[in-house]
Image (cartoon, rainbow, N blue to C red):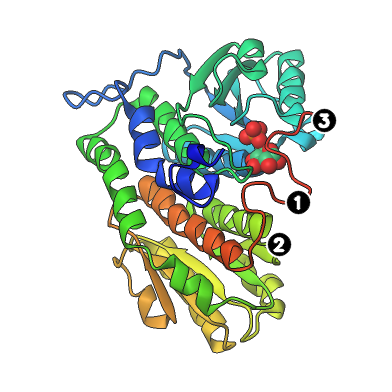
Amino acid sequence: EETGKSGYDHFMLKEIHEQPRSLRQCLRGRVSELDGTVDLDVDVDPDGVQFVACGTSYHAALCGVSLFHEAGIPAQAFLASEYATSPPPVDGDLVIGVTQSGETADTLSALREAKRRGAETLAVTNVVGSSVSRECDQTLYIRAGPEIGVAATKTFSSQVLALALLVLSGTGASRQDVAALRDLPGNVQQVLDESNAEDIARAYDGSDAYFFIGRGLQYPVSLEGALKFKEISYEHAEGFAAGELKHGPLALVTENTPVFAAVTGDDLLARKTIGNVKEVEARDAPVVVVTDGQNDAARYADHVLEVPVSDDRTAAILANVQLQLVAYHAAALLDRSIDKPRNLAKSVTVE
Ligand code: G6P
């Protein structure tokens, strides 16, 4: 098993560092630099989309919702375990199951329910020949390569990228889209080479709790940042939509609860999140911003995790890589069982 880690202390860290390669594999042969055509070997043209997924894959599905919305296609994401009581798909809806392993019982059962309700189904998975790929009408592979660490890392990035490609396969990619996709693996490499996440994990070791906030695509990233953190550090971590802080969670914020805010770009969403960062700062909580420097969030921060400038799709993936590293280093400082956290399994085959 030691040799499988290629010199890294844990599979999780190895897999975090594999992301430039796994993202390249996801892109390979799928996007034409010439005319922006995206060819994925799947044939879908949905009027609407319902996602079903669990855990980290559910967070990727939430990113998928934003991506489809931006392209003018209505989309919703459901936790697979809640799908049986959700509104049924309507005619023309595609139900997409996002599952790394392709074996998660809740997700398989939600997809069977979708079929019973008459919907077409698409699997987005990492594992060739998995149950989900056999049961769904079509399959889109994320091509991340095997993931051993229980906490999903590289597969989240590849799920989001695959869903972005799925949307672009319907609309075609603009020159800017093609450039952002082409630059993504190199930008992830830059984050990995230059990240100060270990220093930040050290600075906030021993805090009472860790909060994560964001808007738009950075909202699922904040949920995922918190999930990763709690899974492997066993510390209390929660992700919130930045705008929801004032509706409750702000009561939990103290000088001993660092707040990580993912704020990229310089649009209205970013400016609103900066407003929330100021609210947190006014309550004396330490603030860490993940930013590409296109806005002035860093002015209100105690620490900054930098990501290269890109578009909003790829910025979400880049910000998430920084949060993966923070979670990893926080757990390493506490000497946790990072690759096999207590009570968790890589794939849960019971409902
Ligand atoms: C388990 C794993 C999580 C994973 C979830 C969904 O709970 O510990 O890391 O996100 O299952 O797994 P899937 O294979 O369906 O993506």
The x, y position of residue 204, in whole percent, is 56, 77
Q: In the image, which is nearer the foreground, mark 2 or mark 1? A: 1
Alpha-carbon distance for marks 1 and 3?
18 Å
- The amino acid marked with disc number 3 is Val
> In the image, is the residue at mark 1 within 8 Å of ligand 1 by its beta carbon?
no
Question: Can you tell which mark lies on residue 342?
Answer: 1
Residue 39 position within the rendered picture, expressed as x and y whole percent measured from the top left: 34, 18
The residue that mark 3 highlights is 350
Q: CA distance from mark 2 to mark 1?
A: 9 Å
Residue 291: in sight, yes or no?
yes
Relative to 250, say whether 349 is above or below: above
Q: Quadrant of residue 105?
A: top right
Q: Is residue 54 visible?
A: no
Q: Residue furthest left?
A: 34
SS at mark 3? loop
Of the four image quadrants, the one with ligand 1 is: top right
Q: Which residue is mark 2?
A: 234
Asked if residue 257 is positioned above or below residue 236 in the image, the reply reads: below
Left or right of 133, for residue 18: left
